[in-house]
Amino acid sequence: MTSAWPDAVEEILDGDLAVALAQVTPARGVVLTPITNFALRDRGASTVTVLSSLGAWRKLDRMRRDPRVALAFHTRAHGFTDRPEFVLVQGTASFSARPDRAWLESIEDTWVRFMGPRELGPVWDRWMRVYHWERVGVRIAVRRVTVWPDLECLGEPATFGAPPCPDSPSAQREPAMGTAPRVDPVKAAARATRLPHRLLAWVDADGFPFVVPVGSVSVGSVSVGSVSGRPGGVALSVPPGLAPAGGRRAGLLSHWFSPGVLGQRQHGHTGWLAAEPGACEVGYAPHTHAGYHLPPSRLLYRALVGGFARRGLRQARRAGFVDGPVSR
């Protein structure tokens, strides 16, 4: 659907190591997840493809329920390019829940480029089999590519494909449990401040996730109630004019990763966002939290991701998401 994106965007899509996947929740919020970029794209066909382990089946299940997604190319850390742009790719995802071993073998070179070799010796090959081979390609038919000239999204963006939404999304109805924080905002702010990459996302007027970078994070300096103005929550610095006015569900992500993504640390929240028109500081009340810390150890990385992939695949089978036995 898009016209071909320019060479500068092609270089970023080819070079970033980690990107952020934004997905729409049933309540019209957004979940943000860091994923490894494998540079699988087709500029002529306007598609970008990412990989997902079947052990991460809940992520895939969200796509099946609502295929509108976004990818934020928001950091050049440990990648293969130093271009300055922030790139937001929005599109519709599709996938088969049955792995294609021949296709996975055909992308061996790009796997090695970003993740290192899959051949690890008889013991690790057996342990990592589910992680390496029980995975699928998620093909994103690109609707729109928005490019800001800087990673802070302070300059004027260029758009390729569908034009930007002419209207801001309407404010959402407040949750039945209220908009106040349900996760300690002091701890949430401290966790976010310690990590270098921070993003905020909401559902735009056309139903696709919209993602922006977050600068400073502080506690309690703005209100988060969309109507009552109840104080509390976290104050987030965002690019001026991008956050829609009013209250709505939104996702907040902070993360860090080491070369080869062997080391990882992330904290993800869903919660309530409130902003004034044209604001460069918004209020955020965290409602849920999920996170983990993986030190940069090759041994620990293999042990943990192999175990998580096996456990997740068993859960996917019990939920009826995939068929067939778990690889041994």
Image (tube, rainbow, N blue to C red):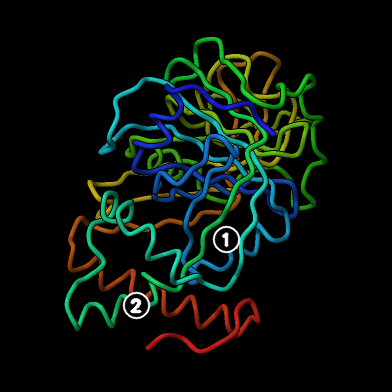
Q: Is residue 62 left or right of residue 258?
A: right
Amino acid marked by disc 1: Lys
Q: For residue 16, what is the image quadrant?
A: top left
Q: Is residue 37 above or below residue 245?
A: below
Answer with mark 2 or mark 1, whichever residue precedes in sequence. 1
| Element class at badge 2 | helix
| Element class at badge 1 | helix
Residue 167 or 38: which is nearer the viewer? 38
Position of the N terminus, as image quadrant, is: top right
Q: CA distance from mark 2 to mark 1?
A: 20 Å
Residue 142 or 191: which is nearer the viewer? 142
- Image coordinates of residue 17 in percent, x first then y, are 34, 42
Q: For residue 107, what is the image quadrant?
A: bottom left
- Image coordinates of residue 36 in percent, x first then y, are 39, 50
Q: Residue at x 44, y 72 (%)?
A: 101
Q: Is residue 140 left or right of residue 291?
A: right
Q: Is residue 198 left or right of residue 22?
A: left
Q: Is residue 61 above or below residue 33?
A: below
Q: Residue at x 69, y 41 (%)?
A: 249
Position of the C terminus, as image quadrant, is: bottom left
The numbered disc on residue 59 is 1
- The mark tally for this picture is 2
- Image coordinates of residue 5 in percent, x first then y, are 54, 26
Amino acid marked by disc 2: Arg
The numbered disc on residue 72 is none
Q: Residue at x 32, y 44 (%)?
A: 256
The residue sitting at the top extreme is 156
Query: Closer to the observer: label 2 or label 1?
Result: 2
Q: Is residue 322 above or below residue 57?
A: below
- Image coordinates of residue 176 in percent, x first then y, are 80, 52
- Residue under circle 2? 129
